[in-house]
Image: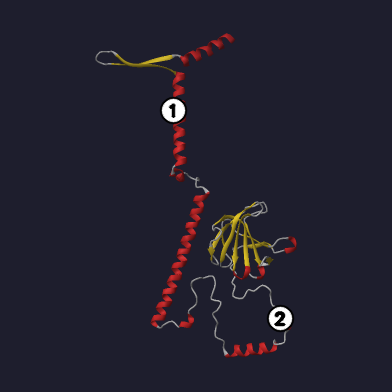
Amino acid sequence: MVQKKRKHQKSFWHRIRFKYKLSFFNEATLEEVWSFRLSQLSAFVVLAVFAFFLIAITSFIIIKTPIRNYLPGYLDVEVRKEIVQNALKADSLERMLAVQKLYLDNVAGILTGTLPLDSIRTIDSLAHADANYEIPRGKVESEFVKKFEEEEKYNLSVLTPNSVPTEGAFFYKPVSGVISSHYEAEKRHYGVDLVAAERESVLATMDGTVVFTGFDVNYGNVIQIQHRNGFLSIYKHNELLLKDAGDRVVAGEAIALVGNTGKLSTGPHLHFELWYKGSPVNPEEYISF
């Protein structure tokens, strides 16, 4: 039995290594023009090498050329970031067209005399109004203000006003969400946690300049914006940052996308902090979440 098995194996190797001759003859003279010898094993090796090089060349072409962008699910982070930025630019362009249309309508109304000059308000930013605009007081309001000023003339409490000036400042809600954790300075939690949908736009709370963008192990992608009157806003655990340090932003402009980055994050949310001249303040005292 063992000899029969060995004989079968020997016959198998002999068969696949046996060389066959392929010849080409001249039909008129029956002269052999060209011939070569090839075994089954050699043919398999040649086909395997050819298939390997074909797969390698195809993979190289797909990886090194734009063809890879047409493969399902192959879009990388940079391409997705570009798509998001283009969508935001399209939204900004639509907003600016609306502002320009309102401006032209106001100019046309002034030139035709159908629009009073006193009704014109600032339209260069839809997020805040002109702080210097004063609404004319009526007779009843003027009498009330005069009476109130007389009653409060000797009130000593006016000598210790709020140390954080907010006159003329409008704070934009950074994201639409639910507060999951409140401001607790004694627990070193200097902001509020807002649970929101993943990849929802994070908005700048006021006009300002981006002073920091980067990644922190605990807080993930972080962006900080310096505002007027000494305010500084901080946005943590973002999925993607849309601005770089030095960029100017306006209130309500998208600066990042809600994410779940950093060791201290347990789900998609935004950790929002508000600081004034180096000290943290409770954002809920300035923004209605």
Q: Nearer the viewer, residue 255 or 159?
A: 159
Q: Nearer the viewer, residue 289 or 93?
A: 93
Q: Which residue is mark 2?
A: 159
Residue 87 rendering spot, x and y as whole percentages: 48, 58
How many numbered marks appear? 2
Residue 13 rendering spot, x and y as whole percentages: 50, 15
Query: Which is more N-terminal, label 2 or label 1?
Result: 1
Q: SS class of the residue under badge 2?
A: helix
Crowdedness near tag 1: few (<14), some (14–19) or many (≥20) residues, C-alpha within 10 Å: few
Q: SS class of the residue under badge 1?
A: helix
Q: Is residue 40 above or below residue 81?
A: above
Residue 50 is tagged as 1
Which residue in the rendered view is the most extreme toward the top?
Answer: 3
Is 189 situated left or right of 95 in this image? Answer: right
Residue 96 is tagged as none
**Rendered residue at 45%/20% (across/down):** 42
Q: Is residue 104 visible?
A: yes
Q: Is residue 232 above or below residue 2?
A: below
**Image quadrant containing the C terminus:** bottom right
> Which residue type carries mark 1?
Phe
Which residue in the rendered view is the most extreme toward the left?
Answer: 28
